[in-house]
């Protein structure tokens, strides 16, 4: 994740849309901010942050400002508990994604063996092909 964001980049990538704000209505401040940051991070990176430190301070401040919450409220968000797991599921559902299953892994492996490994064994090529497949 990039660390330095220009104001126009924050607006483009970290502004909460009305349908995204609707997901936050029933949550307390720390969970509202945590959920919102997870959502926007996932939309930008295609994965969730492992911890608070992965989320740039400027993006935390920008999202907190939109929610009218103090940015340090994120310190009360549990990045290891049940709540974050539920938030990840809700975000994936909202965005139309799901976690990969063992069946998905097998299908990807078979596809890579047939379509890519027959002519190119470079790791970079496999990763690029896998991301295209997904």
Image (cartoon, rainbow, N blue to C red):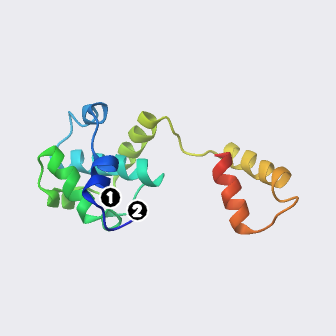
- Residue 27: x and y in percent read 21, 39
Q: Is residue 84 left or right of residue 93?
A: left
- Residue 34: x and y in percent read 27, 51
- Residue 127: x and y in percent read 67, 60
Query: Residue, x 85% and y 51% (percent of image)?
Result: 114
Q: Nearer the viewer, residue 2 or 50?
A: 2
Work out which residue is located at the far right of the displayed protein and give it.
118
Q: CA distance from mark 2 to mark 1?
A: 8 Å
Q: Is residue 133 left or right of residue 92?
A: right
- Residue 134: x and y in percent read 63, 46
Contact check, label 2 and label 1, Cβ < 8 Å = yes
Instruction: Decide: is 39 above or below 24.
Output: below
Pointer 1: residues within 10 angstroms few (<14), some, or many (20+)?
A: some
Q: Which mark is residue 21?
A: none
Instruction: Decide: is 90 above or below 82.
Output: above
Q: Is residue 130 left or right of residue 7?
A: right
Query: Residue, x 24% and y 62% (percent of image)?
Result: 58
Of helix, strand and loop, which one carries label 2? loop
Query: Residue, x 39% and y 38% (percent of image)?
Result: 90
First in sequence: mark 2 vs mark 1: 2
Can residue 120 be seen in this snapshot? Answer: yes
Pointer 2: residues within 10 angstroms few (<14), some, or many (20+)?
A: few
Q: Dot 2 corresponds to which residue?
A: 50
Q: Dot 1 corresponds to which residue?
A: 79
Of helix, strand and loop, which one carries label 1? loop
Query: Residue, x 35% and y 58% (percent of image)?
Result: 80
Q: Nearer the viewer, residue 26 or 96?
A: 96
Q: How many marks?
A: 2
């Amino acid at each position: 994740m990039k660390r330095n964001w220009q104001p126009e980049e924050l607006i483009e990538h970290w502004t909460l849309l009305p349908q995204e704000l609707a997901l936050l209505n029933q949550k307390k401040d720390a969970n509202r901010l945590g959920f919102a940051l997870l959502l926007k991070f996932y939309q930008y990176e295609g994965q969730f942050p492992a911890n608070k430190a992965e989320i740039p301070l400027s993006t935390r401040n920008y999202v907190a400002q939109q929610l009218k919450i103090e940015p340090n409220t994120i310190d009360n968000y549990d990045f290891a508990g049940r709540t974050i797991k539920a938030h990840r599921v809700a975000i994936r559902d909202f965005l139309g994604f799901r976690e990969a299953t063992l069946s998905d892994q097998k299908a990807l492996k078979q596809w890579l063996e047939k379509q890519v490994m027959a002519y190119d064994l470079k790791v970079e090529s496999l990763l690029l092909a896998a991301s295209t497949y997904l």
